[in-house]
Image: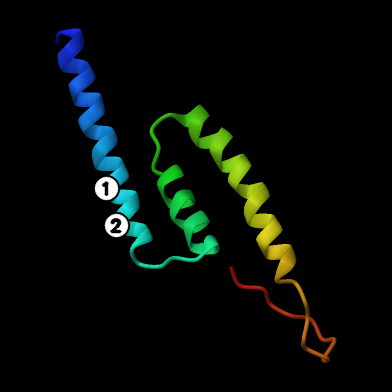
Amino acid sequence: MSYSVKLEKIAKEKQQSREIVKEILSFGVSEHQKLDIINGLVVSLENNKALKDISEVLKNYREVINKEEETDNNSNKQNKIILE
């Protein structure tokens, strides 16, 4: 495959990726949903190192979101089951 053909293929794939992102954003997704979508894509990566590295970064951001939502409006102090 010649260099110019390879570049054309890469450019076409990048354009398709931008179109997919545009379509997802057209749904009006929240920040939390964006992180969930990114996480869903990350776990499908074949490159194990990339999967681990990106998951670690996402974990940090997803924890921040969860900490912001930790306010307990339940006055009952019994043990609770947390479902994720």
Q: Amino acid at mark 2?
A: Glu
Side of 48 where 15 appears, left or right: left
The residue at 75%/72% (across/down) is 70
Task: Answer whether labels 2 and 1 touch (C-beta < 8 Å).
Answer: yes
Q: Nearer the viewer, residue 25 or 43?
A: 25
**Judging from the image, what secondary structure is the residue with disc 2 in?**
helix
For the C terminus, which image quadrant?
A: bottom right
- Depth check: 56 or 23 in front? 23
Quickly name the residue at label 1. 19
User: Camera-side residue: 45 or 6?
Assistant: 6
Is the N terminus in the top left, top right, bottom left or bottom right quadrant?
Answer: top left
Residue receiving disc 2 = 23
Q: Amino acid at mark 1?
A: Glu
Q: Is residue 83 above or below residue 33?
A: below
Q: Furthest-bottom residue in view?
A: 76
Q: Position of residue 30 (x, y in %)?
A: 50, 66
Within the image, what quadrant is residue 67 found in?
Answer: bottom right
SS assignment at label 1: helix
